[in-house]
Amino acid sequence: MRAFGHRPIASITGPEIARFLTSLDANPSFGPRTVNKQRQVLCSVFRHAMRDDTFTLASNPAATTDKRREPDDAPIDFYEPEEVLALARAASSACESMSTPTTRSAPSFAAAMARIPEPQP
């Protein structure tokens, strides 16, 4: 982190870290997840510095900053088995109509899928 690299670790405060994260928020190429990752790295560095065998820092100033709300993950849309079979059949028939003597003998994914039996209700 160039913003704090030249500073003694004990001199960095929570409000300074909050201002740094706010400056990342202002950058249109950074989303909430990117800002949270930067916050996570800072928290980890300061947590390590708090250990007795490192710098025995008294507190973690990054832990006092707010985590950004990230948008919920979009639901995963997937094909039903019947849809996969319909796509395979359509691809298989398209492949057959475009086939040449060379490609006619080559097995295709669509041909393999077309051989899968229909699911029973």
Image: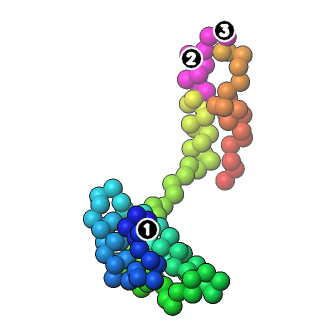
Label 2's element?
helix
Q: Residue at x 37, y 67 (%)?
A: 3
First along the sequence among labels 2 and 1: 1
Q: Is residue 56 above or below residue 73?
A: below
Q: Position of residue 114 (x, y in %)?
A: 67, 33
In depth, the one of 12 and 68 nearer the eye is: 12
Q: Identify the residue position indicated by label 3 in the image.
A: 101
First along the sequence among labels 3 and 1: 1
Q: Identify the residue position indicated by label 1 in the image.
A: 5
| Residue that lies at the very extreme toward the top in this rendered image | 101
Q: CB atoms at circles 2 and 3 under 8 Å apart?
A: no
In the rendered structure, the answer to whether residue 71 lies left or right of residue 113 reads left
- The quadrant holding residue 23 is bottom left
In depth, the one of 14 and 120 nearer the eye is: 14
Mark 3: few/some/many CA within 10 Å (<14, 14-19, 20+): few
- The secondary structure that dominates the magenta segment is helix
Q: Is residue 69 visible?
A: no
Q: Is residue 89 magenta?
A: no
Label 1's element?
loop
Q: Which residues are magenta?
A: 92-102
Give the colour scheme shown: rainbow
Q: Position of residue 61 (x, y in %)?
A: 43, 84
Q: Identify the residue position indicated by label 2 in the image.
A: 97
Label 3's element?
helix
